[in-house]
Amino acid sequence: MPDTCPKCQQHNVVKSGIVKERQRFRCRDCNYYFTVKKLGKQIDDYYVTKALQLYLEGLSFREIERILGISHVTVSSWIKKYNISRPPHSEFHTTYKVFKQNELLEFMQKEENIKGSGLIITEFGDKYMMIRWERFRK
């Protein structure tokens, strides 16, 4: 039950039926009827940060959706909300892989896997994600 009336801020609030499957309330002081705003699904800030990092590294909204399991529309709205824009890039393509710890160590031991490209490795739950792109060449 809400603590106060949204109109007069008084604490004299009682239940007053159900409208569209939501509890309705009435303030006894000002006779105002209202429903409590439904809270949307809250997503941990960790995933917001990871999504924005992946976007800045060149991954598409759909790729981010597949990796994090968060809707591409949600990712797009975060980018608009925080006014994020990618820096201009020349011709290169970003790739990513998700590894378990032992797989990552095995991959990193081979010089041909890491030579001639840029790498970022970030924790991803109980795994590690490696983002790789070719270095700029003139």
Image: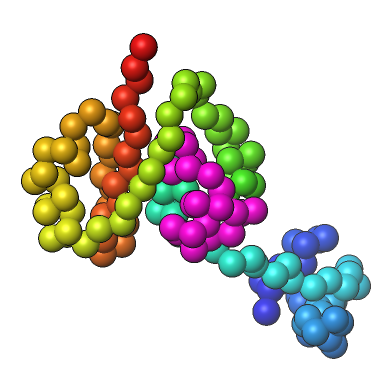
Out of 9 and 24, give the one closest to the viewer.
24
Name above or below for residue 91 compared with residue 75.
Answer: above
Q: Position of residue 84 (x, y in %)?
A: 55, 33
Name above or below for residue 57 compared with residue 122.
Answer: above
- Give the left or right position of residue 2, taking residue 21 as reference: left
- Give the left or right position of residue 36, taking residue 55 as reference: right
Q: How are the residues colored?
A: rainbow
Q: Position of residue 21 (x, y in %)?
A: 80, 84
* Number of on-image labels: 0
- Looking at the image, can residue 49 be seen? no
Residue extending furthest toward the top: 138
**Quadrant position of residue 98:** bottom left
Placement of the N terminus among the 4 image quadrants? bottom right
**Quadrant position of residue 74:** bottom right
Identify the residue at horizontal 43%, vertical 35% (top origin). 93
Out of 122 and 25, give the one closest to the viewer.
122
Residues in magenta, as a range: 54-74
Placement of the C terminus among the 4 image quadrants? top left
Q: Is residue 68 magenta?
A: yes
Identify the residue at horizontal 59%, vertical 67% (top origin). 41
Which SS does the magenta portion mostly show? helix
Out of 128 and 114, give the one closest to the viewer.
114
Identify the residue at horizontal 12%, vertical 52% (top origin). 105
